[in-house]
Image: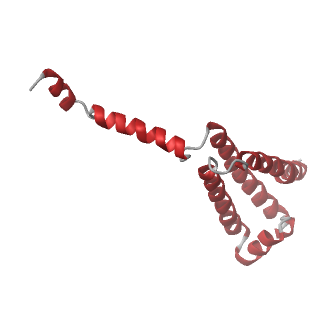
Amino acid sequence: MTELAIQILNQPYSQVEIFRFAADKQRAKTVGLVPSKEIIILGVILIFIQFLDGIFTAYGVHAFGNSAEGNPIIRSLMNAIGHIQALVIVKSIAIMIVGYLCLVSNQISWIAGAMKGMIGVYMFAAIIPWSAIIISHVA
C-alpha cells in the first residue's frame, strides 16, 4: 500500500465522506432545514418567556385562584384538571409551536417578524402584568 492509502485508512473519515458531509450540510442550509441565528435566538427567547409566564401564572393562580387567569380557555382547563397540569399542557404545546416555527422559518418569510411580535405581546400582556401583581402581593 502507498503511504497515502495508509493515511486514508487510518483517518476516521475518508476525504469522500468529508466532502459528502460538507455538501449535505450546505444543501440543508440551502433547502432551509437549518434555522438562521436570528430565528434560533428568537426561539430561545420565546421558550424562556413561556417558562417564565408558566411560573408567574402558577404563582398567581395559586395565590389568587383560577379566576386570576385571563384566558377563559386556559381557566376552564385549570378548573377541569388543575392549574399546574393545565399550565404544563398549554406551555408544552406553545413550546412545540415555537420549535415548529423555527423549523419552517426559512420557508415562510414573516415568521421572524411574528416571533418578535409575540415576544412583545407576551412581555406587555403577561410578563410585566404578572411581575407587577406578584411584586405587589409579596411586598
- Front residue of 103/57: it is 103
Q: Is residue 120 above or below residue 7?
A: below
Q: Residue furthest left?
A: 1
Residue in the image at 65% along x and 44% along y: 44
Task: Name the side, left or right, on which 45 lies relative to 137.
Answer: left
Instruction: Give the x, y percent position of residue 42.
Output: 69, 43
Give the number of callouts: 0
Q: Residue furthest bottom?
A: 80
Instruction: Give the x, y percent position of residue 13.
Output: 28, 35
Visual colour scheme: secondary structure
Please state, as top left, top right, bottom left or bottom right, where the N terminus lies in the image: top left
Instruction: Give the x, y percent position of residue 107.
Output: 63, 50
Q: Is residue 74 above or below residue 100?
A: below
- Front residue of 24/57: it is 24
Q: Is residue 131 above or below residue 17?
A: below
Task: Name the side, left or right, on which 29 lies relative to 119.
Answer: left
Instruction: Give the x, y percent position of residue 129.
Output: 88, 51
- Front residue of 7/40: it is 7
Residue in the image at 77% along x and 54% along y: 56
Task: Name the side, left or right, on which 47 lies relative to 62.
Answer: left
Q: Residue furthest top?
A: 3
Q: Is residue 53 above or below residue 12?
A: below
Residue in the image at 41% along x and 35% along y: 22
